[in-house]
Image (cartoon, helix red, strand yellow):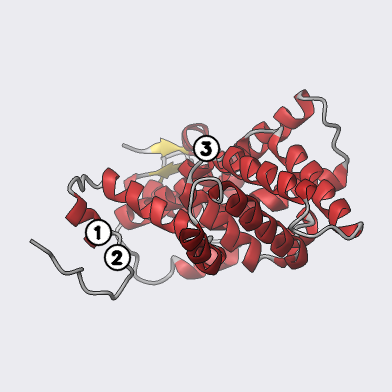
Amino acid sequence: MLLTVGELAKRCGLTVRTLHHYDAIGLLRPSSRSGAGYRLYGQADIERLHRIQALRQLGLPLADIGHALSGPQPPLAGVVDRQIAQLDRDLADATRLRERLVHLHAQLSSGQPLDLADWLDTLELMTMYEKYFTAEELKTLPLHTDPDVLPAWSALVTAVQSTMDRGATPDDADAQQLALQWMEMVGRGTGNNPAFLLRLHAMNEAEPELRERSGITPELQQFVEQSVVTARLAIFARHLDAHEMERMRAHYGRQMYAWPQLIAELRAARTDGVQDAESVRIACRPAGQPPPPVHR
């Protein structure tokens, strides 16, 4: 089947002027002409045009496209595969952008006015989240999806900093009350997912910009952690004897982040179908540690 220049332009979404230009620069010459001298394009011409369009979508200038097509050509299926891969990346980028815009729309709808700096900060923060969480995980992370969580976090950070500024210690009752509120906010922001808590902790440790934006300085984090330990030990003291409390005071603070790790591993073991206690012990042992002995 042969197509005239007008028919080819209509079918591929180009202009006749563009096809004339491709012909003039030797990029796409018609394989034949009609008796009246009109350009006629055959199957091989259409395949070459597809390659040209694919390379244009990748951003190559026409001169480079001509050079690329002057040598041996890979199978057209390979070109189509690369186009599909590029489209997949474009779709993923578009999906991420849509999620960011939905998030910003929710903030605006909730009455939170945003200036340009706020928009940029929010977009940067979302990009940072994507380094530590998959797209599916972000859909279930309230800190990312709930527009009310971040303002509540900010207010709590300000309250803790004010408490520190007036010279409070982790032993003070108001510091411990704020610490317990902090733990409630952790649960709310992570959807009570300990794996998300560990991921956010790692993100906070590795991203200085996040610390600067959130106000959770190393000093504030240490104050909160000490206050949490003190508040929880006060609760444990109501139920444990003196010997047990001595052991708790010696070890609880050092093991603060071991508990979320263990809970996350237990949940993963359940998800993997591990049912009996011995299998759970093996599944949750530290990396590199041999299986525990079996006592019968």
Instruction: Point out the residue furthest to the front here.
Output: 242
- Which mark is drawn over residue 139? 3
In this view, the residue in front, 36 or 145, is 145
Residue 236, how many percent across, how many down? Answer: 54, 50
Residue 229, how many percent across, how many down? Answer: 62, 57
Can see residue 230? Answer: yes
Do callouts 2 and 1 mark residues in contact (Cβ within 8 Å)?
A: yes
- Residue 134 lies left or right of residue 73; in this view the side is right
Disc with the residue nearer the chain's start (3 vs 1): 3
Q: CA distance from mark 2 to mark 1?
A: 6 Å
What residue type is disc 2 on? Arg
Q: In the rendered view, would you say 268 is above or below 283?
A: above
Question: Residue at left 79%, top 46%?
Answer: 174
Q: Secondary structure at mark 3?
A: loop
Question: Residue at left 33%, top 57%?
Answer: 78
Q: Residue 146's image quarter?
A: top right
What residue type is disc 3 on? Lys
Q: Secondary structure at mark 1?
A: helix
Q: Which residue is mark 2?
A: 285
Q: CA distance from mark 3 to mark 1?
A: 31 Å
Q: CA distance from mark 2 to mark 3?
A: 30 Å
What residue type is disc 1 on? Arg
Residue 246, how many percent across, how many down? Answer: 52, 65
Q: Which residue is mark 1?
A: 281
Can see residue 29? Answer: no
Instruction: Locate the N terminus and report the quarter of the image it occupies.
Output: top left
Q: In the rendered view, would you say 163 is above or below 35?
A: below
Dot in front, 2 or 3: 2
Dot in front, 3 or 1: 1
Question: Residue at left 82%, top 25%?
Answer: 111
In this view, the residue in front, 104 or 168, is 168
Disc with the residue nearer the chain's start (2 vs 3): 3
